[in-house]
Image (tube, rainbow, N blue to C red):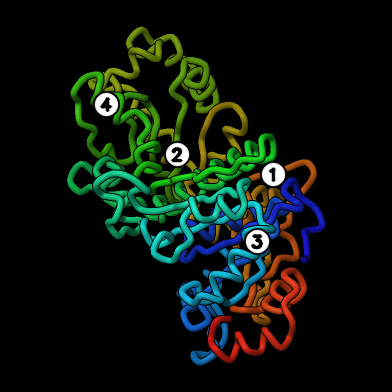
Amino acid sequence: MPTAAKGALKGVIILDLTRVVAGPYCAMLLADMGATVIKIEHPKDPDLTREFPPALGGDDEAVSGFFAQYNRNKMAISLDLKAKEGRELFFDMVRKAHIVIENFRPGTMDKLGLSYQTLKEINPAIVMTSISGFGQSGPNAPRPAFDSSAQASGGLWSINGTVEEPMRVGTVLGDLSAGLYGAIGTLGALREAERGGRGQHVDVSQQDSIISLTENALVTYTTTGKVAIPEGNGHPFVKPYGRFACKDGYVFFGAYTDKFWREACQVFGDEDLITDPEIDTMAKRFDGEVYQRRVHPVVERWCASHTKAELEAMTGSRFPLSPIKTIDEVVADPHVREREMVIPVEYQGHRFEVFGNPIKMSSGTNEHGAHAPLSGESNDTVYAGWLGRSEEELARLRESGVI
């Protein structure tokens, strides 16, 4: 079985039954850190994101950059888990693996005869991570869900946007946050299994994940009874802290503490405001009426006189100010490039630039030189090389559609 050249998780074998984003992202993070991830897809119904845009190539041979981004550094095999022989092959892999990750609707693994209870009888140390819309328990557990289901049911949609119109966050945060929590939970369970020889079932819900990202909205309600509403580009109490227009776009300005406010006044040549008795403390600047009358117009004036690049250069490391960058500006950012957050991935003869792994480890990770696999690409390596099945048996399994 091929293993990564380096990485904290080198030698860890993961069976990845996931599709679309949340589960594949979870497994991708672990693959980047050195785990051997075997993506398992139905022979006739592979991960549908293999056809998702953006794509390169002609219409009949379109190759998905979306799939490449979330499935880099993985092996791939085809397997029909509904077939008896398919389950037997899967059980053989479970005996040798450390982790199983799945993001089916709750109950699906049970119907397939692949419940955690079944898997732990085969391998007591196995860790199974399940990512779903509403979790493995509770009255809503069976409900189907997408990212927007989590943003809606977890409260995030109601507090994002403008006062006039709550808006979905412009990325699949329900999927991505569940993938992140899945990776954290998986690593915690793996540590326990390595220490005591007993695995466990990790249950991650997209709704739960979103609720945990609502910052102070939940505790504000339970403490004061106040229901959070969208704040637009501002903050419910921290001021000045938000979006301000400049000559060529917008910046985030965040000099709200006394120290940062003093630095901002010095940078923009308004030192007299540092000791102005109406706005000389953070508490005074937090007052809504005072902020709108005295502080907001000052920051508007400061920003409107300069470009994004000028403001970034002027402020440097003195106080928080960041240009609100479009994606093309992010990709071109020298800092982003140096941090290796834009990396190449090869897939079906095409080269895609995708986001890198935000986890930087001194021993290194495996994003560079990564490729995304074809469906069933690793069948021979896994079934013959790892499980020891004969070529005659594999030919029969192919003929019957099991692999």
Q: Earlier in the sequence, mark 2 or mark 4?
A: 2
Q: Residue at x 53, y 51 (%)?
A: 128
Q: Are marks 3 and 1 in contact (CB under 8 Å)?
A: no
- The amino acid type, in three-letter code, at marker 3 is Val
Sort mark 3 into few (<14), some (14-19) or many (20+) by Cα contacts within 10 Å. Answer: many
Q: Which residue is mark 4?
A: 292
Give the quadrant of the C terminus: bottom right
Q: CA distance from mark 3 to mark 4?
A: 54 Å
Pick whichever, 122 or 38, lies toward us: 122
Query: Disc 1 marks which amino acid?
Result: Lys
The nearer-to-camera label among 3 and 2 is 3
Q: Are marks 2 and 1 in contact (CB under 8 Å)?
A: no
- Relative depth, front residue between 302 and 226: 226
> Given contact means CB atoms under 8 Å apart, are the residues at marks 3 and 2 in contact?
no
Residue type beneath disc 2: Phe
Residue 388 falls left or right of residue 84: right
